Image: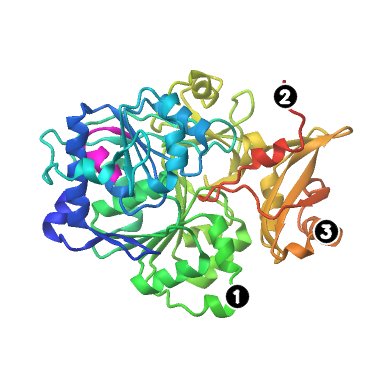
């Protein structure tokens, strides 16, 4: 149930395989290296309940560092490797990190915040050194490979990716339980996806995101091998499934779209029969995309809806989804309520804010205003991730959009996710964002910003074609009135779109 136990039984088994370099970290290496770092944490004064942070690319030792903090009973924050200095400094100060680990690859940003983060007492750097940082390899080399005496479970404290504002840190309760104690997520994973020591889990996304980090660590509790992609590439992902006989994987809808847009001869080139579970989450998946994925890979597509906040968990398998197309599932953790702006509960079929009741409570660390904004206005203890949706008569949830992205045009609510889902499957569209822009008469009008598959096709003719394509499939008021083009959209590697950055280009700055 943890790397030490796996290492005792199968020390030479790969715990991590890096897809690009081929570097292997065995369970013995994972166990010994995480023990060394845990000893270093104790020697520098870090005790259970203290906090560390690390900002790394998908590095061979990423999960090792997480395990070291976990087995030392610490809070640990994995920070996006794409953040700039201001956001990095904010997170390090906000979470109260006493130790910070980064890599030579990210040295420019990591070193830029030293003066702004006085609470950080220990700074370690992998693969090299930089001003203010000690070599990670030298600092850990002399410490014992055996566990620390007071080993206990820590917990991650992760931050939202900041798609709608400054990142929000979610600080859970620290249990300090024995290291082999199973948590709720492990129990859900065991129940739904049945990992075993023979499982091979493909992780194509950045490990600092909540789902990749938590699922990789919990699959390692089962003794599985984790194949980590340094960067997602659709054909390489298929190659890896074939090469390593991958049994489990986790994706986001934009990855499915890129896989489906591979030429047919490429898609059919690889043997994928080992894959038993293809899990997806993070954003609503367009219905035609999921239909095509189930047709291609079979009924092995599993979807869940949850958040970093951990306040609820919904799930749906392929067979149920085909009977309720578009759903993100029914609750396995928490009870779903759909409410209007006043907090009154709405009947099935009506759109409103999605709240969870009877699930774990959470707070946004150091930000009581944001915490209150996620609670229902009538004080019943229900919490929301900020999504809008509705439930059907059988209790299946359907997501409409983020509350913050809703467009009000002429007094009518427009949910841009609908038009995005339609346009995302157009063969000439590589990526798309839909949002509201100012309109003198209507308040807001619907705008699409598109990354075309062939950049040279960007122009009035393609814009007209896409508007007409959307109008043939949706009510006209839901469709974009205009289309702009970009070479690339600002999208997080986990698939989340930084729609706020696009939207801000069209709106006057607020005073």
Is residue 475 something one can see in this rendering? no
Q: Quadrant of the C terminus?
A: top right
Point 38% across, 31% down: residue: 360
Residue topped by disc 3: 459
Q: Nearer the viewer, residue 418 or 150?
A: 150
Please identify the quarter of the rendering in which residue 412 is found.
top right
Dot 3 or dot 1, earlier in sequence: 1
Q: Which residue is mark 1?
A: 263
State whether residue 275 is above or below residue 45: below
- Quickly name the residue at label 2: 510
Vertical comparison of 381 with 257: above or below: above
**Relative to residue 160, is residue 47 depicted above or below?**
above
Secondary structure under badge 2?
Answer: loop
* One can see residue 396 in this view: yes
Disc 1 is placed on an element classified as loop
Q: State the image quarter where residue 359 is shown.
A: top left
- Please report contact status of discs 3 and 2: CB closer than 8 Å, yes or no: no
Do residues under tags 1 and 2 come within 8 Å of each other at their CB atoms? no
Instruction: Give the SS element for disc 3.
Output: loop
Q: Nearer the viewer, residue 373 or 435?
A: 435
Q: How many angstroms separate mark 3 from mark 2 (CA)?
A: 31 Å
User: Is residue 429 found inside the magenta-colored segment of the image?
Assistant: no
Q: Give the percent coordinates (x, y) of residue 118.
A: 38, 22
Please tell me how crowded label 1 is: few (under 14), some (14-19), or many (20+) other residues with Cα within 10 Å: few
């Amino acid at each position: 149930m943890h790397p030490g136990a796996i290492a005792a039984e199968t020390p030479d088994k790969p715990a991590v395989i890096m897809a690009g370099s081929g570097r292997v970290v065995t369970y013995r290496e994972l166990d010994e290296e995480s023990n060394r770092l845990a000893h270093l944490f104790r020697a520098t004064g870090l005790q259970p309940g203290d906090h560390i942070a690390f900002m790394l690319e998908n590095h061979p030792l990423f999960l090792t560092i997480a395990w070291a903090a976990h087995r030392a009973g610490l809070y640990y924050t994995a920070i996006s490797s794409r953040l700039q200095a201001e956001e990095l400094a904010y997170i390090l100060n906000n979470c109260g990190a006493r130790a910070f680990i980064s890599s030579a690859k990210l040295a420019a940003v990591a070193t830029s915040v030293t003066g702004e983060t006085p609470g950080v007492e220990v700074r370690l750097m992998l693969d090299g050194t930089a001003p203010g940082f000690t070599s990670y390899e030298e600092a850990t080399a002399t410490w014992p490979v055996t566990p620390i005496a007071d080993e206990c479970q820590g917990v991650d404290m992760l931050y939202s990716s900041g798609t709608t504002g400054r990142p929000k840190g979610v600080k859970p309760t620290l249990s300090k339980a024995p290291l082999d104690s199973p948590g709720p997520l492990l129990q859900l994973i065991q129940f739904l996806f049945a990992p075993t020591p023979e499982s091979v889990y493909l992780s194509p996304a950045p490990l600092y995101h909540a789902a990749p980090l938590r699922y990789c660590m919990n699959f390692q509790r089962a003794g599985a091998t984790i194949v980590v992609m340094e960067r997602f590439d659709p054909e390489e992902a298929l190659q890896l499934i074939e090469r390593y006989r991958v049994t489990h994987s986790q994706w986001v809808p934009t990855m499915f779209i890129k896989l489906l847009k591979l030429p047919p001869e490429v898609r059919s080139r690889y043997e994928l029969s080992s894959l038993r579970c293809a899990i997806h989450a993070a954003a609503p998946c367009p219905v035609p995309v999921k239909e095509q994925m189930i047709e291609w890979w079979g009924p092995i597509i599993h979807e869940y809806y949850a958040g970093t906040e951990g306040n609820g968990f919904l799930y749906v398998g392929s067979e149920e989804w085909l009977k309720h197309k578009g759903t993100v599932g029914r609750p396995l953790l928490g009870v779903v309520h759909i409410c209007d702006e006043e907090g009154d509960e709405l009947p099935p079929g009506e759109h409103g804010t999605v709240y969870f009741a009877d699930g774990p409570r959470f707070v946004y660390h150091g930000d009581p205003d944001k915490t209150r904004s996620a609670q229902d206005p009538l004080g019943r203890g229900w919490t929301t991730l900020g999504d809008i949706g509705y439930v059907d008569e059988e209790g299946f949830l359907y997501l409409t959009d983020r509350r913050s992205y809703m467009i009000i045009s002429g007094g009518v609510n427009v949910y841009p996710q609908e038009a995005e889902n339609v346009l995302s499957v157009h063969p000439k569209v590589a990526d798309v964002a839909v949002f509201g822009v100012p309109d003198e008469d209507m308040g807001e009008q619907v705008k699409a910003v598109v990354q075309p598959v062939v950049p040279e096709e960007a122009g009035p003719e393609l814009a007209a074609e896409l508007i007409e394509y959307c109008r043939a499939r949706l009510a006209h008021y839901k469709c974009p009135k205009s289309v702009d083009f970009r070479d690339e959209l600002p999208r997080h590697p986990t698939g989340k779109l930084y729609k706020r950055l696009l939207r801000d280009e069209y709106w006057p700055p607020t005073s």
